[in-house]
């Protein structure tokens, strides 16, 4: 069988109120190294203006090794993940990462939020409580989310994003995303 992710817990928080699960948004600081020569290819401390990064667990937003290695993690926990090529960038490699590289990540979890897939977000988005989301409601929610994270996004980008969400989510094409369409996705994991 293909090698799996090796997870080492480097630091455990004193208290853990909640562990990460599929669909959660995680705010992380991380450093990535090549196992072969120990060189660093990315660090949020160095490269991202020192800003941590949001990552949604379990939707293949990053490499598969992250989805596997960052489950059941607590805020304040630090993990070292050793990720084989098959669960990283494989035969192709990417950017500074050569093909067939085993990667090492030190990941520090700062915050957990309900991801966009959770029931709580649906209720937050559904402004008139009719159990379905209109394009306007989704747009207002996205605006708030972006502003909360300090991102500047113009209306055209928002409209494009909303259209894209509706293309994917509005299964019956009625111009609304129902609670069922929103919460239960079949092809995600």
Image: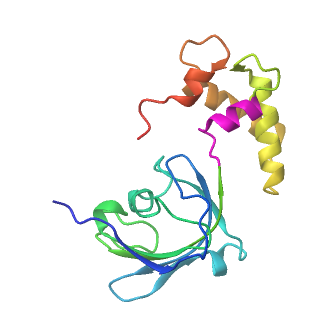
Q: Is residue 44 above or below residue 152?
A: below
Give the vertical position of 127 relative to 35 (above or below). Answer: above
Side (left or right) of 26 relative to 157: left
Residue 29 visible in image:
yes
Does the stretch in magenta take in 121? Answer: yes
Observer able to see residue 152: no
Q: In percent of the image, x 47 and y 49: which residue is there? A: 58
Q: Position of residue 140 (x, y in %)?
A: 82, 34
Q: Where residue 95 sits in the image (x, y, percent)?
A: 46, 69
Q: Is residue 81 left or right of residue 138?
A: left
Residue visible at 54% across and 58% down?
Answer: 19
x, y percent for residue 33: 44, 81
Instruction: Please report the residue visible at 63 percent of the width from the left and 34 percent of the height from the top.
Output: 119
Q: Quadrant of residue 42?
A: bottom right
Q: Quadrant of the C terminus?
A: top left
Q: Which residues are magenta?
A: 114-125
> Which percent across, then down, holds residue 45?
65, 79
**Does 56 appear in magenta?**
no
Residue at (76, 26) in percent of width and height: 126
Q: Quadrant of residue 87?
A: bottom left
Residue 103 drawn above or below residue 60: below
* 183 left or right, relative to 137: left
Pick whichever, 24 or 148, lies toward us.
24
Left or right: residue 189 versus residue 176 is left
């Amino acid at each position: 069988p293909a090698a799996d992710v090796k997870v080492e817990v480097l630091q455990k928080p004193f208290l853990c109120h909640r562990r990460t699960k599929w669909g959660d948004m995680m705010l992380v600081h991380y450093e990535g190294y090549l196992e072969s020569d120990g060189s660093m290819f990315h660090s949020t401390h160095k490269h991202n203006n020192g800003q941590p990064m949001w990552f949604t667990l379990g939707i293949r937003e990053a490499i598969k090794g992250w989805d596997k290695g960052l489950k059941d993690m607590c805020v304040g926990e630090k993990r070292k993940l050793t990720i084989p090529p098959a669960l990283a960038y494989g035969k192709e490699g990417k950017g500074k990462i050569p093909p067939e590289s085993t990667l090492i990540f030190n990941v520090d979890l700062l915050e957990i939020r309900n991801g966009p897939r959770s029931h709580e977000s649906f209720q937050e988005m559904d402004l008139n409580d009719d159990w379905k989301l209109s394009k306007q409601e989704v747009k207002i929610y996205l605006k708030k989310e972006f502003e909360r994270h300090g991102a500047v996004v113009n209306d055209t980008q928002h409209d494009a994003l909303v259209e894209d969400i509706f293309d994917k989510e509005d299964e019956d094409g009625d111009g609304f995303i129902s609670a069922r369409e929103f919460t239960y996705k079949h092809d995600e994991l």
